[in-house]
Image (spheres, rainbow, N blue to C red):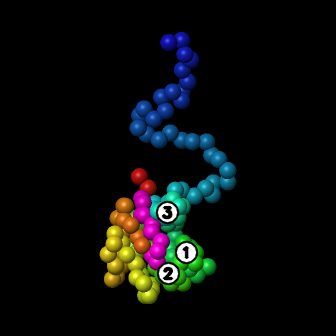
Amino acid sequence: MGQKRTASDNFGTDRVAKPTQPMGDGTAQSPPLATLVHEPTGRIYPLLADVVTIGRDKSCAILIGEDTRASRKHAQILRRGPIFQLEDLNSSNGVFVNGARIAGPHELRVGDRVEIGTQVYVFRRRA
């Protein structure tokens, strides 16, 4: 009681987004639809491109260090609209999802554990 109310006090009560003030140059990128989270370190890899390569090669979007069980270009994630598919790129040691080796394109689901070499990642989606 006695508090001064402002127009922003009711923000969001009508469940419709209200316009925001423009900021910067307008090139800010929206949050990724999905990410891979490196399990031991918690490092987050946003899946922004339609094709994301994973391996030891410096050209890979997700670079695996000196893990000798990982190939230079070990796997890739393809984004097809809202679907993300994981594919093995003919690696020597394979790609595992939730402990099972994948034989072809595998649609990723929230919480899937992806094993590449000795590295473990968890697939997450934006809420």
Residue that label 2 marks:
70
Q: Quadrant of residue 113?
A: bottom left
Tag 2 near tag 1, CB within 8 Å: yes
Q: Which mark is residue 64?
A: 1
Residue that label 3 marks:
40
Q: Could you say whether the residue bearing mark 3 is in a helix, strand or loop? A: loop
Marks 3 and 1, how far apart at CA: 13 Å
- Which of the pair 62/66 is nearer the observer? 66
- Which of the pair 40/84 is nearer the observer? 40
> The residue under label 2 is which amino acid type?
Ala
> The residue under label 1 is which amino acid type?
Ile
Q: Could you say whether the residue bearing mark 1 is in a helix, strand or loop? A: loop
- Which of the pair 37/4 is nearer the observer? 37
Instruction: Please state which of the two labelled residues, at mark 3 or mark 1, is closer to the viewer.
Output: 3
- What span is in magenta? 116-125
- Residue 12 in the image: state x and y as whole percent: 45, 35
Which numbered disc flags the more N-terminal residue, 3 or 1? 3
- Which of the pair 30/97 is nearer the observer? 97
Above-or-below relation of 9 to 3: below
Marks 2 and 3, how far apart at CA: 17 Å
- At 48% from the left and 81% from the top, the residue drawn is 69
Which numbered disc flags the more N-terminal residue, 2 or 1? 1
- At 56% from the left and 17% from the top, the residue drawn is 4
Count residues near mark 2 (Cα–Cα under 10 Å), then give few for <14, some for 14-19, many for 20+.
Answer: many
Marks 2 and 1, how far apart at CA: 8 Å
- At 34% from the left and 82% from the top, the residue drawn is 104
